Amino acid sequence: MPDIKWHATVSQSDYTASVEYLALLMSSLEAAATVDRLRQAKTVTFYAKDIIRAARLPVLPLDDPYVSHELDKINKGLPLSPILLIRGKARKGTRLIIADGYHRVCANYRLDPDNRIPCHITDSKKMK
């Protein structure tokens, strides 16, 4: 199995992509505020299998072009960006949101579900 390298920080483009995605789920102002909280969050790690379960998303196949792209980066020894997560609310039945990095999670899961993935995570203050 290849050694997976990670950037120490999240790229600006990942934050921008997160705002764009989250604006589909909440107001643009809430999305921007949520991403601001992600910028302030410290890096933590979670297992790939737990991220997938909490997000209630399917694990994409190896031949998915975006998963394949992430696997190519891993095989070339290029570092991946930490992923960005919005914590779900168990009592309300809401799932974890992968604001950015779903394909990186799937690639890691396909290599080994027990891979630990660097993440920035925050609560969603306004989501119900």
Image (spheres, grey):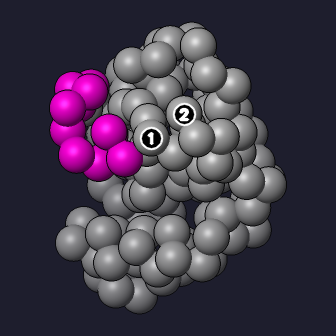
Q: Classify residue 20 as left or right of residue 50.
A: left
Is 97 magenta? The answer is: no
Q: Quadrant of residue 61?
A: top left
Specify the farthest residue to the front. 76
Label 1 vs label 2: CA separation? 5 Å
Magenta stretch: includes residue 63: yes
The total of numbered circles placed on residues is 2
> For mark 1, what is the residue?
72
Residue 19 in the image: x percent, y percent? Answer: 41, 77
Which quarter shows the N terminus? top right
In this rendering, would 93 be left or right of 70?
A: left
As drawn, the label of residue 41 is: none
In this rendering, the answer to whether 81 lies above or below 52 is below
> Circle 2 sits on which residue?
75
Q: Residue at x 47, y 17 (%)?
A: 111
Instruction: Determine whether the residue tagged by mark 1 lies in a helix, strand or loop.
Output: helix
Check whether the beta carbons of the residues at disc 1 and disc 2 lie within 8 A of each other. Answer: yes
The magenta segment is: 58-69
